[in-house]
Image: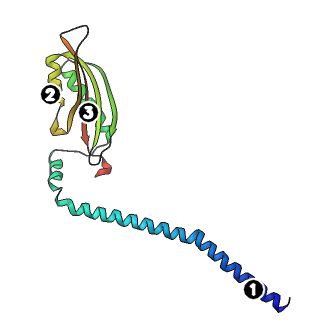
Amino acid sequence: MTPREKNLLIFLGVAFFIILNFVGFNTFYAPAVQKAESEKRIAEDKLRLAEAVVAQGDEFEPEIQWLENSGTAVTTPTDAQSKLQALLRKQASARNLDIRDSRILPYQPGEHFDRVRVLFKVTGMERDVFSWLTSIHQVSQRQVVTKMELKPQTNDLTRIEVEIEVEKWIITPDEV
């Protein structure tokens, strides 16, 4: 091989090496750096937001104290729904109401509280139904009747049919 051919081969090797590095840099390294920088910016934004929330902690202190004093327990939506359904069933049975239907409705996640819902249909004497309604509507426990439909029972006009939807606000474990 002549010295000219050797120089050409070295030149082509160096040129190929430089081109290969340029392509590799633009294909693999630069996008990875951009992705890391964008993730860093997102993490810094989340950190600033978390620091702002912590800084506002004094502002929310009365609400936190109210939650602690009112006995709000951290629970899962399925557990809260089953306990709510059991409470409604127990209260209805204690007042001699006939339970026609009881369904657990899908829970609704929220920003600060999640809401669990139960649908109940019962029949009974008017006095017993109203007693049941006042016993289950407990604002202090964040449990309220949000929908109610009353109508006389078709075959016995001394009794009424009630369809209610009861919601309870809870705090889920991931929000603590």
At label 2, counting other C-alpha atoms closer than 10 Å, the crowd grade (few under 14, some 14-19, many 20 or more) is few
* Residue 17 as seen in the image, left or right of residue 7: left
| Residue at which label 3 appears | 84
| Residue at which label 2 appears | 134
Q: Residue 170 falls in which quadrant of the image?
A: top left
Q: Position of residue 45 (x, y in %)?
A: 35, 64
Residue at the (22%, 64%) spot, across then down:
55
Residue at the (24%, 40%) spot, across then down:
169
Q: Nearer the viewer, residue 102 or 20?
A: 20
> Residue farthest to the top?
155
Distance of mark 2 from mark 3, alpha carbons? 15 Å
Question: Disc 2 vs disc 3: which is toward the camera?
Answer: 2
At label 1, counting other C-alpha atoms closer than 10 Å, the crowd grade (few under 14, some 14-19, many 20 or more) is few
Mark 1 secondary-structure assignment: helix
For the residue marked with disc 1, what is the amino acid? Answer: Ile
Residue at the (74%, 82%) spot, across then down:
12
For the residue marked with disc 2, what is the amino acid? Answer: Thr
For the residue marked with disc 3, what is the amino acid? Answer: Leu
| Residue at which label 1 appears | 10
Q: Position of residue 90 (x, y in %)?
A: 23, 26
Q: Position of residue 42 (x, y in %)?
A: 39, 64
